[in-house]
Structures are given as structure tokens and as C-alpha cells.
Amino acid sequence: MFRGPVAEISLSAIGQNLQAIRKIVKNRPVIAVVKADAYGHGAVEVSKRLLKEGISYLAVAYINEAVELRDAGITVPIIVLFDTEDVKSIFDFNLMPVICDMDNALSLSRESKKRNIPLKVHVKVDTGMGRMGLHGNHIITDLMKISDMHGLEITGMLSHFSEADLSDRTYAKIQLERFNAIKEKISEKLKRRIFSHIANSAAILSFQEAHLDAVRPGLMLYGYSPFNYGTNPPLPPFAKGGQGGITHGINLIPAMSIKTRILCIRNVPSGTPISYGRTFITKRPSRIGVIPLGYADGYNRLFSNNAEVLVNRRRAPVAGRVCMDLTMIDLTDVKGAKEKDEVVIIGRQGNESIKAEELAFRSNTISYEILTTLGSRSKRTYVETH
Ligand SMILES: *Cc1c(COP(=O)(O)O)cnc(C)c1O
């Protein structure tokens, strides 16, 4: 019996989120970011659904992720953001690498020569993220060298913003100016325009000038806005009236629900300590439920006495420390709760809902981490409703 959590993924929600993105970016091509197993949603299923919606490109972090998509019969161009080590696979699986330095470029060019097969590449320039990409004061000469290398055709240029939530756009503007300056110079030298992209979800939502020739959304596809409740708006997004950060009038639909079932329930007297370290002691005669979910399933130990789940359309608080495979919840105020009842960790029950942002806030992280950790350790099912 599979007792761990189930991740129910709504493919129709992902489809709708894509439509919402297209509307904002006026139908520019969308490079759908499906790295980290589509942020925990399952890269193959999500990609297949996005292809049905006519997506132009997919992007992954590492070559093995791209190979998984090719093995599933996906033939659309796949941009590999961070990995050029295995040059053979790039050719064998017809992938589109992102060149980050001259060594990358040389080894790809050598392989191209050996096979006598030309290769379309995108080149990354570092405009201030300080992570990967051509950098320093020789970016233009480097780009020209790459362009002159045997077999390599530069079909795209990209950069990445360092302000993931763009709550302050000052630095992003500098990055975009640098990017545009590089683009102009290189277009002049090569006497052609280069397809350019820089916008992540935050820039799609709040920085129209950065939409350029294509956009690269990840988080938004899965139904979340990257805007941080820590800054703006001031209330946590799950507080009354909050809708999960600024959504600029667009309606994103969270695609992932995480669910489990109550394993057992016990009635205990007042003064009963619950779980490791006795950090929770009942203050009244209580009904304590046990759920088959713990930190080994990605349910963070920081949720100890510090999160809620939904049972019978009501919120039930976590009672005591989260264990490796189990968590206790206080069901005293949840009328009619019984063993095997559905427990929603993320998702909706009636009028109540818990979003990834709420759990992110409680564990001092971002919704990206909540989705990838819970999503990757759950058994996934796919639905066409939302
Ligand atoms: C992850 C990633 C994205 C997508 O970012 P979101 O904030 O999820 O939209 C875009 N570009 C690059 C290079 C990335 O690594």
C-alpha cells in the first residue's frame, strides 16, 4: 500500500496559466521552463500538455532532464540551461545548449566538426546575476569568436534577472540595459537580429520592456506569482483578502494539490504531550489525528506546531513536532472527522484553501521550494479539471 502523499496535478490549470501568460506577453513565443521535473509537477506529463497548447520551446536545467523528454517522444526544441558537459548527448538527442563560456563553445564546435552536423546554440550573457554566462569586458569579442566557430549557429541570446521577485526593479533595469546594449552591438557586427529572451515569471508580470522576443516562465505556469509577501503586499498572501501576492489582475490557478488520509485518531485527556520533545501538550480533552506524512515526504520539520491542514473543509493545526513519516493534527474542532478522511496539505476543500505560499511563509522559504520538495516526493495523479 502506498501511504505517502498524493500530488494531484491539474493539467487544465497549467493550460489556463499558459493562456494567461500569452495574453500578458501579447502572444510572444513561450519557452516553458520544466526544470526540476516541472517544479515537482512531472516534466513529461506537463510538457505533453503544453505541446498540445502549441508551446514553442521547452527549457530544462540538465541534459538528463532533456533526454527524459526525448525518450517520451517529445520532439519540440529543448533548451538546456546549465549543462553542456556531455556534448555527445546534445547531438544524439538534438538538444539546444546554452553556451556559458568559451570552453563550452569549443567542445561543441569540435563535436560538430567531427559529426559534420551544424548545431543551433543559445548564448548566455551575465548582466548581473553573477552565476553563469559570458562576462567581463570582452563579451562582444567572445560572442564574435563563438559565431565564427565551425558548426555553431547562434540562434538565441539570453540573460537572467537576479531579483526573482522584482519588488525593486532598479537593478533589473540596469540588467536589461546591459543586455540590450550587448544585443545591439552584436546585431550590428553580425548584421542580423538575434532572438533574445530574459523574462522570468516576475518580469512577465511586472516588466513589460523585458518581454523581448520570447519569455521564459516557470512558476507562473504552475499557478503561482513570484511576488513576495515579505515586501508587497504587506500581509501574508493567505491572510484575509490576500490572493497570493500581486497577480496584476490575472488569474493564476495553482496546479498542484497535495493530499493524504488520516491514519488513525485518538481521544486523549487534557495535559497529554504529543510527539517528540513534548512541544505540544493538550489544553483540553482532544482528538488527535495521525497522518502518514513527515519530513521524509518533504513536509518540513519547520511545520511543527506551525502549519495547518484541511479536514472536512476546516483547518486543523499541526500538533507537536513533525516526525520522519508521521505528523499529528488537532482535530478537536473538526466535527465528524474520522479515520481515512481526506487531508489536504496544499489545495482546496470547500471554501478553504492552502497555497504553497502559506507553507513557504511558515517555513521561511519560497513557493518554488515547497512545490519542488512536496511534488517530487509524492505519487502523482493527473486530472483535467480545476
Ligand atoms: C528557473 C528559470 C526561469 C524561470 O523562472 P521563474 O521565476 O520560475 O519564472 C527562467 N530562466 C532561467 C535561466 C531559469 O533558471
Image (cartoon, rainbow, N blue to C red):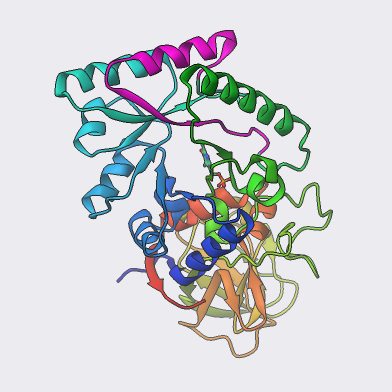
Which residues are the magenta region? Answer: 134-163
Which percent across, then down, holds residue 152? 32, 23
| Residue 215 location (% of width, % of height) | 54, 46
Residue drawn at (22%, 39%) of the image: 93
User: Is 31 above or below relative to 100?
Assistant: below
Horizontally, residue 205 falls left or right of residue 83, namely right
Residue 235 seen by the camera: yes
Would you say residue 229 sits in the magenta stretch?
no
Residue in the image at 59% along x and 24% along y: 184
Furthest residue toward left: 115
> Is there any visible trace of residue 257 in the rendered image?
no
Residue located 61% across and 24% down the image: 127
Q: Does residue 154 appear to the left or right of 224 in the view shown? A: left
Depth check: give the residue in front, 354 or 207.
207
**Viewer-nearest residue: 82 or 102:** 102
Q: Position of residue 25 (x, y in %)?
A: 61, 53
Residue 383, x across and y down, in percent: 41, 74
Q: How many marks?
A: 0
Name the residue at the front extreme. 191
